[in-house]
Structures are given as structure tokens and as C-alpha cells.
Image (cartoon, rainbow, N blue to C red):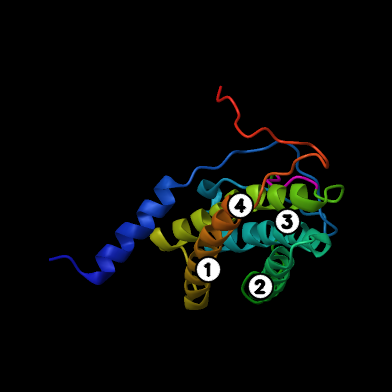
Amino acid sequence: MVTVASVGITVAAAIEDRISLVQQPHAPADSDGQSMGWVDDKAVNSEFDYLTQMISHDREAVTAATQLRRSSAPKMRRLGEEIVATQTAEIATMKAWLAKWYPGRSTRVGYQPMMRDLSKLSGDTLDRTFLKGMIPHHKAAVMMSQRLIRHGYPRHKGVAVFARKVRDAKHAEISQMQRQLAAEPKERPTGMIMPATRAVA
């Protein structure tokens, strides 16, 4: 007999299995001395791993999303504001849990960046580069959260609930960003006259 729970598990597993990530070089440190960037979800083998790695992951997202304050598109500015607010709150929650449950334990993690520097970009280039980077960045969070849940790593109920919310919210945002990316016109040089048709290579 197929139950709703079993269907949910199957769908979640399919989401995890379909997601692929591209690892990029360089791992700059943040103001706390932690490396910032991408981590392999396979490195999440405990509740502690998940919390420490997700903090660095969220910090990178906040840094990138802050750049959308300069976007000329209202919907992109709103997206940036939402990501900054949500993930700043997530960071605060996870840091409080680490301080309470794992006092004195080092929270330094090995982490390589996914997001490129957006500070010198503007206009459509800024918006499209952000979306192209944040989609796989969110997928990494989905993968880490789903791995934590599937393997039963949470030691505290609150972390399991948190991971499910992260997985579901970011999966929804991925769909939203994919739609925005598909709708955004590609940047073209000002004054350039585009031909009616183009040859396809």
C-alpha cells in the first residue's frame, strides 16, 4: 500500500538525486575567519556538520543578495531583501543552537565559494549573474538539508523541523528564480540593432 508519507519520501529523494553542483575554486574567509563557499553535501554526517556548514552557506547568500539593492528591477530588489532577511534569521538561529548544544567546539569548516563577486556588475548582468549563481547555491542547501533528514542525523527535533523548512522554502525559491531567469531579457549593447533572424550554430 502506498502511503502519503512514502510518496513524500520518494519525491524528496528524487529531488536530491536530480540536483548536481559544480564545485568552484578559491575559498576566502569571512570576518570570523570561517571559509565561505560551497561544501559537498556528503560532508554533512551529523547535526553539528549541518549547522556549521549551513551558516557559512547562508552567509555567502546574504553577501550576494545584498548586492541586489543596486538592481534596477523591483522584483529583484525584493528577492534580495527576502533572502537577506530570511537567511540572516537562519544564521542567528543556528549560531544560538551551536552555542547551546556544542559550547567550546570549533565551528570552522572547509568551504569553497559558489557565488562570484557581484560588486562590479549592474543592470541585467547583475540580475542574471545573481540568478544563475543562486539557483545552484539554493540546490546545495536543499541537498544538505535532505541528506540530514534522510539519514536521521538530527539530535534535536527543532533541527529536523528547521531542515525541512529550509529544503521546502529553497526548493520553492529555485522554481521562482528559474522563472525569473527565463523571463529576463539577455543584456545587449546599447544602440545595437538586432537582426530579425539569427543563424543557429
> Circles 3 and 4: CB distance less than 8 Å?
no
Read off the residue under disc 1: 169
Dot 4: what SS?
Answer: helix
Q: Nearer the viewer, mark 3 or mark 1?
A: 1
Indicate which disc, 2 or 1, sits on the residue closer to the N terminus: 2
Tell me the residue at 50%/54% (across/down).
143
Q: In the rendering, at what x and y percent does residue 97 appear?
A: 63, 74
Residue at mark 2 to residue at mark 1: CA–CA distance: 10 Å
Q: Quadrant of residue 197?
A: top right
Amino acid type shown at disc 1:
Ala
Q: Earlier in the sequence, mark 2 or mark 3?
A: 3
Image mark count: 4
Give the alpha-carbon distance from disc 3 to disc 1, as whole Å. 17 Å
Find out whether residue 116 is within the magenta segment.
Answer: yes
* Residue displayed at 12% across by 66% down: 1
User: Magenta span: helix, strand or loop, mainly?
Assistant: loop
Q: Whole-percent x and y of residue 85?
A: 71, 74
**Percent position (x, y) of residue 31?**
85, 58
Mark 2 Cα shell of 10 Å, populated few (<14), some (14-19), many (≥20): some
Going from the N terminus, do you reach mark 4 or mark 2 first? Answer: 2
Q: Which quarter of the figure has residue 146? A: bottom left
Residue most extreme to the front = 196
Q: Which residue is mark 2?
A: 86
* Label annotation for residue 181: 4
In what element is the residue under mark 2?
helix
Q: Is 127 or 95 nearer to us in this picture? A: 127
Residue assigned mark 3: 60
Q: Quadrant of residue 40?
A: top right
